[in-house]
Image (tube, coloured by chain):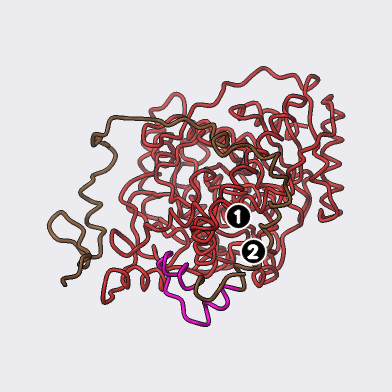
Amino acid sequence: MISDKEIKKLAQLARLQLTEKELEKMKKELEQILNYVKKLKEINEKSLPNFEETSILKNVFREDKPREYKFFDTKVLITLAPEKEDNYFKVKQVIQKQ
Amino acid sequence: MKFLTISQIHNLFKRREISVSELTKYYLEKIKKEDKEIGAFLTVCENLAISQAQKLDKELLKLQKLPPLFGIPCAIKDNILVKNLKCTAGSKILQNYIAPYDATVIRKLKEAGAIILGKTNMDEFAMGSSNEYSAFFTTKNPLDKEKVPGGSSGGSAAAIAADFCVFALGSDTGGSVRQPAAFCQIVGFRPTYGAISRFGLIAFSSSLDQIGPMAKTIEDVKIVFDVIRGKDQFDSTSLDVLDEENLDIKNLKIGIPKEYFTETLDAQIKADILFAINKYEKMGAKIEEISLPHTEYALPCYYIIATAEASSNLARFDGIKYGLSKDGKDLFEVYSLTRDLGLGPEVKRRIMLGTFVLSRGYFEEYYVRAQKVRTLIKRDFMEAFKKVDVILTPTSPFFPFKFGERTKDPLAMYLADIYTISAPLASLPAISFPAIKREKFSGSVQLIGKPMEDKKLIKIASFYDSQ
Protein backbone atom coordinates (compact mmCIF):
# COMPACT_ATOMS: atom_id res chain seq x y z
CA MET A 1 0.00 0.00 0.00
CA ILE A 2 2.83 2.44 0.88
CA SER A 3 5.83 2.28 -1.43
CA ASP A 4 9.48 2.43 -0.28
CA LYS A 5 9.77 5.79 -1.98
CA GLU A 6 6.70 7.12 -0.16
CA ILE A 7 7.85 6.06 3.30
CA LYS A 8 11.23 7.73 2.72
CA LYS A 9 9.51 10.90 1.55
CA LEU A 10 7.26 10.87 4.63
CA ALA A 11 10.21 10.52 7.00
CA GLN A 12 11.85 13.44 5.24
CA LEU A 13 8.71 15.58 5.53
CA ALA A 14 8.42 14.67 9.21
CA ARG A 15 12.12 15.50 9.76
CA LEU A 16 12.81 12.06 11.15
CA GLN A 17 16.08 10.25 10.65
CA LEU A 18 15.18 6.59 10.22
CA THR A 19 17.40 3.66 9.21
CA GLU A 20 16.40 1.30 6.39
CA LYS A 21 15.34 -1.25 8.99
CA GLU A 22 13.25 1.30 10.89
CA LEU A 23 11.66 2.46 7.65
CA GLU A 24 10.68 -1.11 6.81
CA LYS A 25 9.12 -1.64 10.26
CA MET A 26 7.38 1.73 10.13
CA LYS A 27 5.93 0.91 6.73
CA LYS A 28 4.41 -2.31 8.04
CA GLU A 29 2.97 -0.63 11.14
CA LEU A 30 1.51 2.27 9.20
CA GLU A 31 -0.10 -0.13 6.75
CA GLN A 32 -1.64 -2.03 9.64
CA ILE A 33 -3.04 1.15 11.20
CA LEU A 34 -4.24 2.50 7.85
CA ASN A 35 -5.94 -0.78 7.19
CA TYR A 36 -7.84 -0.26 10.44
CA VAL A 37 -8.75 3.41 9.95
CA LYS A 38 -9.96 2.54 6.44
CA LYS A 39 -13.12 1.52 8.27
CA LEU A 40 -14.33 5.10 7.81
CA LYS A 41 -14.82 4.32 4.12
CA GLU A 42 -17.75 2.07 5.03
CA ILE A 43 -19.86 5.17 5.66
CA ASN A 44 -21.94 6.16 2.66
CA GLU A 45 -20.60 9.30 1.02
CA LYS A 46 -24.11 10.75 0.84
CA SER A 47 -24.59 10.69 4.61
CA LEU A 48 -21.42 12.74 5.21
CA PRO A 49 -21.76 16.48 5.88
CA ASN A 50 -19.88 19.06 3.80
CA PHE A 51 -16.41 19.88 5.08
CA GLU A 52 -17.58 23.46 5.75
CA GLU A 53 -20.17 22.15 8.19
CA THR A 54 -17.60 20.29 10.25
CA SER A 55 -16.47 23.25 12.31
CA ILE A 56 -18.79 24.96 14.74
CA LEU A 57 -15.95 26.97 16.24
CA LYS A 58 -15.64 30.69 15.69
CA ASN A 59 -12.36 32.50 15.36
CA VAL A 60 -11.32 34.54 18.36
CA PHE A 61 -9.54 37.66 17.20
CA ARG A 62 -7.28 40.05 19.04
CA GLU A 63 -5.11 42.98 18.07
CA ASP A 64 -1.83 41.84 16.57
CA LYS A 65 0.23 43.54 19.24
CA PRO A 66 2.67 42.06 21.73
CA ARG A 67 1.08 41.61 25.14
CA GLU A 68 2.60 41.97 28.53
CA TYR A 69 2.35 38.89 30.68
CA LYS A 70 3.11 39.79 34.24
CA PHE A 71 3.71 36.20 35.27
CA PHE A 72 6.86 35.63 33.27
CA ASP A 73 9.79 37.34 31.76
CA THR A 74 10.10 36.82 28.01
CA LYS A 75 13.85 37.41 28.25
CA VAL A 76 14.15 34.06 30.03
CA LEU A 77 12.88 32.25 26.94
CA ILE A 78 15.94 33.06 24.87
CA THR A 79 18.23 31.65 27.56
CA LEU A 80 16.77 28.18 26.89
CA ALA A 81 18.08 28.06 23.33
CA PRO A 82 20.99 25.69 22.63
CA GLU A 83 22.62 28.35 20.45
CA LYS A 84 21.99 32.06 20.70
CA GLU A 85 23.59 35.35 19.83
CA ASP A 86 22.58 38.56 21.60
CA ASN A 87 18.81 38.37 21.76
CA TYR A 88 18.40 35.92 18.86
CA PHE A 89 18.12 32.20 18.29
CA LYS A 90 21.06 31.06 16.21
CA VAL A 91 20.45 28.59 13.38
CA LYS A 92 22.56 27.17 10.59
CA GLN A 93 22.58 28.96 7.26
CA VAL A 94 19.31 28.30 5.44
CA ILE A 95 20.08 29.59 1.93
CA GLN A 96 23.25 28.09 0.50
CA LYS A 97 25.70 30.14 -1.56
CA GLN A 98 25.86 29.21 -5.26
CA MET B 1 -3.86 9.62 58.19
CA LYS B 2 -4.68 7.43 55.21
CA PHE B 3 -6.37 8.66 52.02
CA LEU B 4 -7.28 12.06 53.41
CA THR B 5 -9.62 14.28 51.41
CA ILE B 6 -9.51 18.06 51.15
CA SER B 7 -12.26 18.67 53.70
CA GLN B 8 -10.72 16.19 56.16
CA ILE B 9 -7.38 17.98 55.92
CA HIS B 10 -9.00 21.39 56.37
CA ASN B 11 -10.67 20.12 59.51
CA LEU B 12 -7.30 18.97 60.83
CA PHE B 13 -5.83 22.40 60.07
CA LYS B 14 -8.70 24.22 61.74
CA ARG B 15 -8.41 22.10 64.86
CA ARG B 16 -4.64 22.70 64.78
CA GLU B 17 -4.07 18.96 64.84
CA ILE B 18 -1.44 19.17 62.13
CA SER B 19 0.52 21.95 60.47
CA VAL B 20 0.89 22.36 56.71
CA SER B 21 4.62 21.58 57.05
CA GLU B 22 3.96 18.39 58.98
CA LEU B 23 1.41 17.23 56.44
CA THR B 24 3.71 18.08 53.51
CA LYS B 25 6.61 16.21 55.12
CA TYR B 26 4.36 13.22 55.73
CA TYR B 27 3.64 12.91 52.00
CA LEU B 28 7.25 13.62 51.00
CA GLU B 29 8.46 10.87 53.37
CA LYS B 30 5.94 8.47 51.96
CA ILE B 31 7.05 9.23 48.40
CA LYS B 32 10.70 8.82 49.37
CA LYS B 33 10.02 5.43 50.94
CA GLU B 34 7.48 3.93 48.59
CA ASP B 35 7.84 5.51 45.16
CA LYS B 36 10.93 3.47 44.29
CA GLU B 37 8.56 0.60 43.84
CA ILE B 38 5.77 2.49 42.05
CA GLY B 39 7.59 5.08 39.92
CA ALA B 40 4.79 7.65 39.91
CA PHE B 41 7.09 10.69 40.03
CA LEU B 42 9.66 11.94 37.54
CA THR B 43 10.57 14.92 39.74
CA VAL B 44 9.95 15.49 43.45
CA CYS B 45 10.38 19.12 44.49
CA GLU B 46 10.98 18.73 48.21
CA ASN B 47 12.52 22.14 48.87
CA LEU B 48 9.86 24.05 46.98
CA ALA B 49 7.08 22.14 48.76
CA ILE B 50 8.53 22.62 52.24
CA SER B 51 9.26 26.32 51.80
CA GLN B 52 5.73 26.88 50.52
CA ALA B 53 4.30 24.89 53.43
CA GLN B 54 6.22 26.98 55.94
CA LYS B 55 4.89 30.14 54.34
CA LEU B 56 1.34 28.81 54.60
CA ASP B 57 1.82 27.84 58.25
CA LYS B 58 2.45 31.49 59.04
CA GLU B 59 -0.71 32.48 57.18
CA LEU B 60 -2.75 29.78 58.90
CA LEU B 61 -2.56 31.70 62.17
CA LYS B 62 -4.12 34.78 60.60
CA LEU B 63 -6.76 33.28 58.31
CA GLN B 64 -10.42 33.18 59.24
CA LYS B 65 -11.46 31.17 56.22
CA LEU B 66 -9.12 28.84 54.34
CA PRO B 67 -8.72 29.24 50.56
CA PRO B 68 -10.16 26.19 48.74
CA LEU B 69 -6.88 24.26 48.37
CA PHE B 70 -4.99 25.74 51.30
CA GLY B 71 -2.13 23.42 52.26
CA ILE B 72 -3.31 20.57 50.04
CA PRO B 73 -0.42 18.51 48.61
CA CYS B 74 -0.81 17.61 44.93
CA ALA B 75 1.03 16.14 41.96
CA ILE B 76 1.20 17.50 38.41
CA LYS B 77 1.49 15.56 35.17
CA ASP B 78 4.83 16.30 33.56
CA ASN B 79 3.38 17.99 30.48
CA ILE B 80 2.10 20.96 32.52
CA LEU B 81 4.60 23.75 33.16
CA VAL B 82 5.57 24.57 36.75
CA LYS B 83 8.05 27.44 36.85
CA ASN B 84 11.66 26.44 37.59
CA LEU B 85 10.87 22.72 37.57
CA LYS B 86 11.84 20.25 34.88
CA CYS B 87 9.05 19.56 32.40
CA THR B 88 9.82 16.55 30.22
CA ALA B 89 6.43 15.40 28.87
CA GLY B 90 7.92 11.94 29.37
CA SER B 91 10.35 12.55 26.51
CA LYS B 92 14.13 12.52 26.09
CA ILE B 93 13.81 15.56 23.85
CA LEU B 94 12.78 17.62 26.92
CA GLN B 95 14.86 15.70 29.47
CA ASN B 96 16.63 18.82 30.70
CA TYR B 97 14.00 21.43 29.91
CA ILE B 98 13.23 23.75 32.82
CA ALA B 99 9.84 25.45 32.61
CA PRO B 100 10.27 29.23 32.37
CA TYR B 101 6.75 30.04 33.60
CA ASP B 102 3.68 28.61 35.34
CA ALA B 103 0.77 27.24 33.33
CA THR B 104 -2.45 29.11 34.11
CA VAL B 105 -3.75 26.09 36.05
CA ILE B 106 -0.59 26.07 38.18
CA ARG B 107 -0.86 29.78 38.91
CA LYS B 108 -4.46 29.20 40.02
CA LEU B 109 -3.51 26.20 42.17
CA LYS B 110 -0.76 28.18 43.87
CA GLU B 111 -3.09 31.13 44.49
CA ALA B 112 -5.59 28.75 46.08
CA GLY B 113 -2.88 27.46 48.44
CA ALA B 114 -2.07 24.07 46.89
CA ILE B 115 1.34 22.56 47.55
CA ILE B 116 3.06 20.96 44.57
CA LEU B 117 5.02 17.85 45.57
CA GLY B 118 6.30 16.93 42.14
CA LYS B 119 5.77 16.02 38.51
CA THR B 120 4.33 12.69 37.48
CA ASN B 121 5.35 10.12 34.91
CA MET B 122 3.43 9.78 31.65
CA ASP B 123 3.52 8.21 28.21
CA GLU B 124 5.78 10.30 26.00
CA PHE B 125 3.86 13.43 24.89
CA ALA B 126 0.69 11.80 26.32
CA MET B 127 0.69 9.17 23.56
CA GLY B 128 -0.21 5.87 25.16
CA SER B 129 -2.58 4.11 27.53
CA SER B 130 -0.26 2.29 29.93
CA ASN B 131 2.71 4.56 30.81
CA GLU B 132 4.92 2.01 29.06
CA TYR B 133 5.78 4.65 26.44
CA SER B 134 7.45 6.95 28.97
CA ALA B 135 11.05 7.51 27.84
CA PHE B 136 12.26 7.12 31.44
CA PHE B 137 10.61 4.26 33.30
CA THR B 138 7.28 2.53 33.65
CA THR B 139 4.92 3.34 36.50
CA LYS B 140 3.38 0.38 38.31
CA ASN B 141 -0.22 0.10 39.38
CA PRO B 142 -0.25 0.51 43.20
CA LEU B 143 -3.19 -1.92 43.44
CA ASP B 144 -1.29 -4.68 41.61
CA LYS B 145 2.35 -4.02 40.82
CA GLU B 146 2.40 -6.49 37.95
CA LYS B 147 -0.13 -4.38 36.08
CA VAL B 148 0.00 -1.06 34.25
CA PRO B 149 -1.57 2.03 35.86
CA GLY B 150 -3.15 3.09 32.56
CA GLY B 151 -2.19 6.21 30.66
CA SER B 152 -1.20 8.60 29.62
CA SER B 153 -1.74 10.28 33.04
CA GLY B 154 -0.69 7.01 34.72
CA GLY B 155 1.79 8.67 37.09
CA SER B 156 -0.88 11.05 38.40
CA ALA B 157 -3.40 8.22 38.88
CA ALA B 158 -0.83 6.00 40.60
CA ALA B 159 0.28 8.85 42.89
CA ILE B 160 -3.29 9.21 44.15
CA ALA B 161 -3.94 5.46 44.45
CA ALA B 162 -0.67 5.05 46.40
CA ASP B 163 -1.73 7.98 48.62
CA PHE B 164 1.33 10.07 47.70
CA CYS B 165 -0.85 13.17 47.31
CA VAL B 166 -4.44 14.34 47.76
CA PHE B 167 -5.19 15.20 44.15
CA ALA B 168 -3.39 15.49 40.84
CA LEU B 169 -3.72 17.10 37.45
CA GLY B 170 -3.68 15.06 34.28
CA SER B 171 -4.42 15.78 30.66
CA ASP B 172 -6.96 13.98 28.50
CA THR B 173 -6.81 13.88 24.70
CA GLY B 174 -8.57 10.59 24.02
CA GLY B 175 -9.07 9.29 27.55
CA SER B 176 -5.76 9.97 29.31
CA VAL B 177 -7.41 11.18 32.54
CA ARG B 178 -10.39 8.81 32.69
CA GLN B 179 -8.73 5.55 31.66
CA PRO B 180 -5.88 5.66 34.23
CA ALA B 181 -8.42 6.84 36.81
CA ALA B 182 -10.38 3.67 36.09
CA PHE B 183 -7.24 1.49 36.17
CA CYS B 184 -6.24 2.93 39.57
CA GLN B 185 -9.79 3.04 40.98
CA ILE B 186 -9.94 6.79 41.51
CA VAL B 187 -12.02 9.66 40.07
CA GLY B 188 -10.98 11.45 36.87
CA PHE B 189 -12.76 14.28 35.10
CA ARG B 190 -12.37 15.63 31.59
CA PRO B 191 -14.27 18.93 31.22
CA THR B 192 -16.03 20.47 28.21
CA TYR B 193 -13.49 21.51 25.59
CA GLY B 194 -12.19 24.91 26.73
CA ALA B 195 -13.42 24.81 30.34
CA ILE B 196 -9.86 24.74 31.69
CA SER B 197 -7.12 26.92 30.19
CA ARG B 198 -4.36 25.06 28.36
CA PHE B 199 -1.83 27.88 28.55
CA GLY B 200 1.31 26.06 29.69
CA LEU B 201 0.18 22.57 28.67
CA ILE B 202 2.53 20.94 26.15
CA ALA B 203 0.29 20.41 23.12
CA PHE B 204 -0.43 17.01 21.55
CA SER B 205 -3.70 17.39 19.64
CA SER B 206 -5.11 20.87 19.98
CA SER B 207 -8.74 20.19 19.03
CA LEU B 208 -8.88 17.46 21.70
CA ASP B 209 -6.42 18.22 24.55
CA GLN B 210 -7.89 19.16 27.92
CA ILE B 211 -6.44 19.34 31.42
CA GLY B 212 -8.47 17.44 34.01
CA PRO B 213 -8.48 16.99 37.79
CA MET B 214 -7.99 13.56 39.39
CA ALA B 215 -8.72 12.73 43.04
CA LYS B 216 -9.98 10.14 45.50
CA THR B 217 -13.51 11.54 45.62
CA ILE B 218 -15.94 13.35 43.35
CA GLU B 219 -16.16 16.15 45.90
CA ASP B 220 -12.40 16.78 45.64
CA VAL B 221 -12.51 16.71 41.85
CA LYS B 222 -15.21 19.38 42.01
CA ILE B 223 -13.19 21.58 44.39
CA VAL B 224 -10.12 21.42 42.14
CA PHE B 225 -12.17 21.99 38.97
CA ASP B 226 -13.74 25.13 40.47
CA VAL B 227 -10.27 26.49 41.24
CA ILE B 228 -8.66 25.90 37.84
CA ARG B 229 -11.51 26.42 35.36
CA GLY B 230 -12.55 29.59 33.54
CA LYS B 231 -11.76 31.84 30.63
CA ASP B 232 -8.13 32.82 30.26
CA GLN B 233 -6.86 35.57 27.97
CA PHE B 234 -3.85 33.42 27.07
CA ASP B 235 -5.92 30.52 25.73
CA SER B 236 -8.35 31.72 23.08
CA THR B 237 -10.24 28.40 23.19
CA SER B 238 -11.03 28.78 26.91
CA LEU B 239 -14.55 29.54 28.14
CA ASP B 240 -16.79 29.69 31.20
CA VAL B 241 -19.11 26.72 31.71
CA LEU B 242 -22.72 27.05 32.87
CA ASP B 243 -23.61 27.45 36.49
CA GLU B 244 -25.01 24.52 38.33
CA GLU B 245 -28.69 23.84 37.98
CA ASN B 246 -30.89 22.64 40.74
CA LEU B 247 -31.27 19.01 40.12
CA ASP B 248 -33.71 16.44 41.37
CA ILE B 249 -32.62 12.90 40.70
CA LYS B 250 -36.28 11.92 40.22
CA ASN B 251 -36.35 14.03 37.03
CA LEU B 252 -33.05 12.70 35.74
CA LYS B 253 -32.98 10.67 32.53
CA ILE B 254 -29.90 8.50 31.99
CA GLY B 255 -29.16 7.11 28.53
CA ILE B 256 -27.44 3.77 28.06
CA PRO B 257 -25.92 3.48 24.57
CA LYS B 258 -26.31 -0.07 23.33
CA GLU B 259 -23.18 0.23 21.15
CA TYR B 260 -21.01 0.28 24.31
CA PHE B 261 -22.10 -3.14 25.49
CA THR B 262 -20.63 -5.48 22.90
CA GLU B 263 -18.80 -8.79 23.39
CA THR B 264 -15.46 -6.95 23.72
CA LEU B 265 -16.58 -5.69 27.15
CA ASP B 266 -15.18 -7.69 30.07
CA ALA B 267 -17.96 -9.69 31.78
CA GLN B 268 -17.12 -8.50 35.30
CA ILE B 269 -16.99 -4.86 34.18
CA LYS B 270 -20.34 -5.31 32.47
CA ALA B 271 -21.81 -6.68 35.70
CA ASP B 272 -20.40 -3.74 37.68
CA ILE B 273 -21.85 -1.22 35.22
CA LEU B 274 -25.24 -2.92 35.38
CA PHE B 275 -25.00 -2.64 39.17
CA ALA B 276 -24.37 1.11 38.80
CA ILE B 277 -27.31 1.53 36.42
CA ASN B 278 -29.48 -0.30 38.91
CA LYS B 279 -28.29 1.92 41.73
CA TYR B 280 -29.23 5.08 39.81
CA GLU B 281 -32.60 3.57 39.00
CA LYS B 282 -33.24 2.81 42.67
CA MET B 283 -32.41 6.41 43.51
CA GLY B 284 -35.23 7.44 41.18
CA ALA B 285 -33.51 8.20 37.87
CA LYS B 286 -35.13 7.03 34.65
CA ILE B 287 -33.02 4.69 32.55
CA GLU B 288 -33.43 4.70 28.79
CA GLU B 289 -31.65 2.72 26.09
CA ILE B 290 -30.26 4.99 23.40
CA SER B 291 -28.22 4.59 20.23
CA LEU B 292 -25.03 6.35 19.18
CA PRO B 293 -24.84 4.74 15.73
CA HIS B 294 -21.38 5.99 14.71
CA THR B 295 -19.58 4.74 17.86
CA GLU B 296 -17.56 2.13 15.97
CA TYR B 297 -16.00 4.88 13.84
CA ALA B 298 -14.80 6.98 16.77
CA LEU B 299 -11.47 5.21 17.26
CA PRO B 300 -10.32 5.28 13.61
CA CYS B 301 -11.58 8.88 13.36
CA TYR B 302 -9.57 9.82 16.44
CA TYR B 303 -6.34 8.25 15.20
CA ILE B 304 -6.48 10.29 12.00
CA ILE B 305 -7.29 13.63 13.62
CA ALA B 306 -5.06 13.27 16.69
CA THR B 307 -2.00 12.14 14.71
CA ALA B 308 -2.51 14.86 12.08
CA GLU B 309 -2.55 17.50 14.81
CA ALA B 310 0.35 15.86 16.65
CA SER B 311 2.54 15.90 13.55
CA SER B 312 2.03 19.67 13.36
CA ASN B 313 2.35 20.36 17.08
CA LEU B 314 5.51 18.29 17.52
CA ALA B 315 7.25 20.07 14.65
CA ARG B 316 8.32 22.62 17.26
CA PHE B 317 10.76 20.12 18.77
CA ASP B 318 13.57 20.84 16.35
CA GLY B 319 16.66 21.48 18.47
CA ILE B 320 16.57 25.23 17.88
CA LYS B 321 14.55 27.01 20.56
CA TYR B 322 14.80 24.73 23.59
CA GLY B 323 15.31 21.13 24.63
CA LEU B 324 17.72 18.60 23.20
CA SER B 325 19.85 19.67 20.25
CA LYS B 326 22.16 17.56 18.13
CA ASP B 327 24.55 19.26 15.77
CA GLY B 328 24.59 18.30 12.08
CA LYS B 329 26.09 19.44 8.81
CA ASP B 330 23.07 21.55 7.84
CA LEU B 331 19.75 22.70 9.29
CA PHE B 332 17.90 19.61 8.03
CA GLU B 333 20.36 17.37 9.82
CA VAL B 334 20.05 19.36 13.05
CA TYR B 335 16.29 18.77 12.92
CA SER B 336 16.35 15.12 11.99
CA LEU B 337 19.26 14.03 14.21
CA THR B 338 17.73 15.85 17.20
CA ARG B 339 14.37 14.23 16.62
CA ASP B 340 15.87 10.81 16.00
CA LEU B 341 17.70 10.96 19.31
CA GLY B 342 14.96 12.63 21.31
CA LEU B 343 11.70 10.97 20.25
CA GLY B 344 10.52 7.44 21.05
CA PRO B 345 9.01 4.85 18.69
CA GLU B 346 5.31 5.53 19.44
CA VAL B 347 5.77 9.28 18.97
CA LYS B 348 7.61 8.72 15.68
CA ARG B 349 4.88 6.35 14.54
CA ARG B 350 2.18 8.93 15.23
CA ILE B 351 4.12 11.76 13.58
CA MET B 352 4.56 9.57 10.48
CA LEU B 353 0.87 8.62 10.43
CA GLY B 354 -0.15 12.26 10.90
CA THR B 355 2.19 13.37 8.13
CA PHE B 356 0.72 10.68 5.88
CA VAL B 357 -2.95 11.63 6.40
CA LEU B 358 -2.15 15.28 5.73
CA SER B 359 -0.01 14.65 2.65
CA ARG B 360 -1.05 15.39 -0.90
CA GLY B 361 -3.11 12.62 -2.42
CA TYR B 362 -4.30 11.29 0.96
CA PHE B 363 -5.62 14.42 2.66
CA GLU B 364 -9.19 14.13 1.27
CA GLU B 365 -9.34 10.38 1.71
CA TYR B 366 -8.27 10.38 5.35
CA TYR B 367 -8.19 13.74 7.10
CA VAL B 368 -11.19 15.40 5.47
CA ARG B 369 -13.26 12.23 5.79
CA ALA B 370 -12.32 11.92 9.48
CA GLN B 371 -13.44 15.50 10.12
CA LYS B 372 -16.78 14.72 8.49
CA VAL B 373 -17.19 11.56 10.54
CA ARG B 374 -16.35 13.57 13.66
CA THR B 375 -19.37 15.74 12.85
CA LEU B 376 -21.56 12.63 12.57
CA ILE B 377 -20.33 11.47 15.99
CA LYS B 378 -21.19 14.87 17.45
CA ARG B 379 -24.64 14.74 15.88
CA ASP B 380 -25.26 11.31 17.42
CA PHE B 381 -24.72 12.84 20.87
CA MET B 382 -26.85 15.90 20.14
CA GLU B 383 -29.70 13.62 19.06
CA ALA B 384 -29.31 11.49 22.19
CA PHE B 385 -29.27 14.56 24.45
CA LYS B 386 -32.72 15.51 23.16
CA LYS B 387 -33.98 12.48 25.05
CA VAL B 388 -31.65 12.12 28.04
CA ASP B 389 -29.70 14.37 30.43
CA VAL B 390 -26.60 12.26 30.72
CA ILE B 391 -25.10 9.13 29.14
CA LEU B 392 -23.71 6.26 31.22
CA THR B 393 -21.08 3.83 29.85
CA PRO B 394 -18.12 1.79 31.08
CA THR B 395 -14.82 3.76 31.09
CA SER B 396 -12.61 0.89 29.97
CA PRO B 397 -13.50 -2.36 28.18
CA PHE B 398 -11.01 -4.33 30.29
CA PHE B 399 -9.18 -4.32 33.65
CA PRO B 400 -5.52 -3.25 33.95
CA PHE B 401 -3.26 -5.50 31.88
CA LYS B 402 0.25 -6.83 32.47
CA PHE B 403 3.37 -5.04 31.29
CA GLY B 404 4.26 -5.83 27.69
CA GLU B 405 0.86 -7.31 26.93
CA ARG B 406 -0.13 -4.61 24.45
CA THR B 407 3.12 -2.95 23.37
CA LYS B 408 3.87 -5.31 20.47
CA ASP B 409 0.80 -4.32 18.50
CA PRO B 410 0.02 -0.56 18.33
CA LEU B 411 -3.65 -1.27 17.61
CA ALA B 412 -4.04 -3.45 20.71
CA MET B 413 -2.97 -0.45 22.82
CA TYR B 414 -5.30 1.92 20.96
CA LEU B 415 -8.28 -0.28 21.87
CA ALA B 416 -7.87 0.70 25.55
CA ASP B 417 -9.48 4.04 24.66
CA ILE B 418 -12.49 2.66 22.81
CA TYR B 419 -15.08 4.04 25.30
CA THR B 420 -13.32 7.30 26.19
CA ILE B 421 -12.58 8.56 22.70
CA SER B 422 -16.05 9.78 21.64
CA ALA B 423 -16.50 12.47 24.32
CA PRO B 424 -13.38 14.42 23.24
CA LEU B 425 -14.35 14.12 19.56
CA ALA B 426 -17.71 15.69 20.46
CA SER B 427 -16.08 18.22 22.88
CA LEU B 428 -18.19 16.84 25.76
CA PRO B 429 -17.43 16.64 29.49
CA ALA B 430 -17.03 13.15 30.97
CA ILE B 431 -16.24 11.80 34.42
CA SER B 432 -15.05 8.36 35.52
CA PHE B 433 -15.46 6.78 38.97
CA PRO B 434 -15.42 3.22 40.37
CA ALA B 435 -18.80 1.47 40.34
CA ILE B 436 -18.09 -0.47 43.52
CA LYS B 437 -15.48 -0.17 46.25
CA ARG B 438 -13.57 -3.40 46.07
CA GLU B 439 -10.21 -4.62 47.43
CA LYS B 440 -8.75 -4.68 43.93
CA PHE B 441 -10.37 -3.80 40.65
CA SER B 442 -13.97 -2.96 39.89
CA GLY B 443 -15.43 -1.62 36.68
CA SER B 444 -15.54 2.18 36.40
CA VAL B 445 -18.56 4.17 35.32
CA GLN B 446 -18.21 6.94 32.75
CA LEU B 447 -20.86 9.65 32.70
CA ILE B 448 -20.90 11.88 29.61
CA GLY B 449 -22.70 15.21 29.92
CA LYS B 450 -24.03 17.92 27.63
CA PRO B 451 -21.54 20.57 26.51
CA MET B 452 -21.01 23.31 29.14
CA GLU B 453 -23.01 21.41 31.75
CA ASP B 454 -19.91 20.28 33.63
CA LYS B 455 -21.25 21.28 37.03
CA LYS B 456 -24.48 19.39 36.49
CA LEU B 457 -22.48 16.34 35.40
CA ILE B 458 -20.36 16.41 38.55
CA LYS B 459 -23.52 16.77 40.60
CA ILE B 460 -25.05 13.70 38.97
CA ALA B 461 -21.85 11.78 39.75
CA SER B 462 -21.93 12.97 43.36
CA PHE B 463 -25.44 11.50 43.83
CA TYR B 464 -23.83 8.12 43.25
CA ASP B 465 -20.98 8.81 45.63
CA SER B 466 -23.23 9.88 48.47
CA GLN B 467 -25.36 6.75 48.36
Q: Amino acid at mark 1?
A: Tyr
Q: Secondary structure under badge 2?
A: helix
Residue B303 numbered tag: 1
Q: Residues within 10 Å of mark 2 (few under 14, many from 20)?
A: some
Q: CA distance from mark 1 to mark 2?
A: 9 Å
Residue A17 numbered tag: none
Q: Secondary structure under badge 1?
A: helix
Residue A33 numbered tag: 2
Does residue A75 show up magenta in the picture?
A: no
Magenta segment = A8-27
- Residue situated in front as seen by the camera: B401 or A15: A15
Q: Amino acid at mark 2?
A: Ile
Does residue A15 show up magenta in the picture?
A: yes
Above or below B388: residue A20? below
Residue B276 in which image quadrant: top right
Q: Which residue is at the far left?
A: A86
Q: Colour of chain A?
A: brown
Above or below B280: residue B425? below
Residue at the image position 27 percent from the left and 37 percent from the top: A69
